[in-house]
Image (cartoon, rainbow, N blue to C red):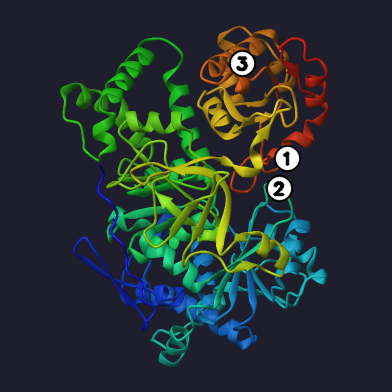
Amino acid sequence: MLPQPKNVIDSERGLLTLVVTEGRMKQKPRTLCDLFYTVVERENEHVMLTKASGKWRPISSSELYKDVLGTARALQQWGIGRGDHVAILSENRPEWAIADFATLLVGAAVVPIYTTLTSEQILYVLHHSGARAIFVSTEKQLAKVEAILESTQLEHIIVMDEWPDTASSTSVVAMVPLMESGPLQRDEAFDAAAKALPRELLATLIYTSGTTGTPKGVMLTHGNLTSNLEVSLDQFEFSAGHTGISFLPLSHITARHLDYALFFHAVTIAYCPVIEELPMVLKEVHPTVFVGVPRVYEKIYNQVEREVGPRGMKRRLYNWALNVGRRHETEIASNRKPNTLAWKLANRLVFNKVREAMGGSVQFFISGGAPLGRELGEWYLKIGMPINEGYGLTETSPVIALNNPRAFRLGTVGRPLPNLQIRIAVDGEILVKGPSIFSGYWNMEMETRDAFEDGWFKTGDIGHIDGDGFLSITDRKKDLIKTSGGKFIAPQPIENSLKANVLVSEAAVVGERRRFPAVLIAPAFAHLEVWAQEHGVHFTDHAHLVADPRVQAAYGHIVAEMNKNLAQYEKLKKFILLPEELSVTNGTLTPTLKLRRRAVEQLYKAEIEKMYADATTPEPVKANS
């Protein structure tokens, strides 16, 4: 039996709560303003790292204080305060955190917006939230806002980059002068007012990326966010001297919560605004903490598989090392480092090369935002890099459960946090109560009512808790597929297993009210093109490539291997190879890289209908380009 987690007593009395964990005592912030002052009062010289002119530059506590207060005073002068909303449309960079803290300190609520959204999508968020001001990062983002400015309630646009020559509105101001106008000494009156803000005050409106339906503004208070803050990552023992990279979009609650947690634990945050630059940033910064969505971990795995190749000495050495890792999975899962000669050799010759590609210093690997495929988790466990998978939603601030170095079980999302109550409904849906649960959706009373059942938040996820208290997620309740024969199929485990193959980028199982399930497969074209060259397959474009009989046969084999592990009613009878990868651009993935199942089905509706129209033989159907 694994050790049970210790309860954390969270008293609402006083400004700060003392939390004792494993002999350590920390002050738990009552509000996010308290978090800011915790960071400031440490007088840390390396709160953040930012890259300018090819060099990394640290940002200290005192510089952060000056920049935040300078920006906050400007908001106050414009009459922005409690009850107001301020949007942020920016990539990850120090100015994001500065704008966030400045808004929170004056009592306003932050409305983060994904930089991948179009002007029309941005307009919906701005109009629905009633934001009075917006921080934008670049001229590109500024142009999006100016295109819709007249239809919004915006009064001020603050640009993070150098002063834009293209600005056409008098409401546009530069952020740098605002930051530089901040005080060099502490402003006691301002600080006291910020520290006195109530825990129940709205801190942020986060608009769900919307895998289905209209985006909803999730209302999270200071209390919601701080109650999740200390408990979620306490078992990782982060501290000063550790470094993490902020590269997942801060518009998403997972990334924002992570940054808050790193701030709280005195971990230095290095900002990576462009995810394509992550491999370089990893080697330059050498982080000790790495948090990614499954898609990021998949890309790392696929790159390793690609470099090893399908055959030859590299492949034989690699397979041998994985077999060694398999024999030591139990030790690795228990946070113990194997000491056999075989392990040391496999680690030196193979596994360390993966670590070096990730900077060479990562001690903690965490995954969230979407389900991590079991096969992918097993691979990382074999190479000595156990990924601590977690689970949560925007509505839960976000963490509900999380594996950690002291309590880890592969295939689960860990034990629920000690300050939450979890219940599994009769139909398997996970219900949750606790201080981190949101208060409702902004201006959506009906949707708010529908989200709760007798005071329990309905997560929409199907799962179960084992005898040791570990939570497992089966699938999204809305994603369950019911065939015409009345059988329910959970598509995500099947899709994740398919994606474990390097030739598969994304997979979408279909079959609602159909006689059998089938799957749409988006190939990983970088790997498929290499495979095609090795097998003498000539092609002019991706549509031509996926139509080749040899390519179809290769994916048919992948599906057939998958079917061996499925129940009869789950077996995939047909598949469609798509001529393009799914992406945020074509609307088939959310900004956090989750599958938009309904969008995929709509985009390829004709191909799906054709596939089911001829159901006599399980042959693949070609998708149009």
Amino acid type at mark 2:
Thr
Image quadrant in which you'd find residue 421: bottom left
* Place of residue 98 in the rendered image (x, y in percent of width and height, measured from the top left): 50, 70
Can see residue 466?
Answer: yes
Q: Please give left or right for residue 294 compared with residue 219 in the image.
A: left
- In this orientation, which residue lies closer to the viewer: 427 or 120? 427
Pointer 1 with pointer 2, Cβ within 8 A: yes
Image quadrant in which you'd find residue 363: top left
Instruction: State the mark number for residue 212.
Output: 2
Q: Please give left or right for residue 328 compared with residue 509 in the image.
A: left
Amino acid type at mark 3:
Tyr
Classify the position of the N terminus by image quarter: top left
- Reading the image, the residue beneath label 3 is 555
Residue shown at 54% from the left, 71% from the top = 99
SS category of the residue bearing label 3: helix
Comparing labels 3 and 1, the label whose residue is closer to the camera? 1
Residue shown at 40% from the left, 73% from the top = 35
- Reading the image, the residue beneath label 1 is 598
SS category of the residue bearing label 1: helix
Q: Rate crowding at label 2 as few (under 14), some (14 to 19) or many (20 or more) other CA atoms within 10 Å.
A: few
- In this orientation, which residue lies closer to the viewer: 34 or 410? 410
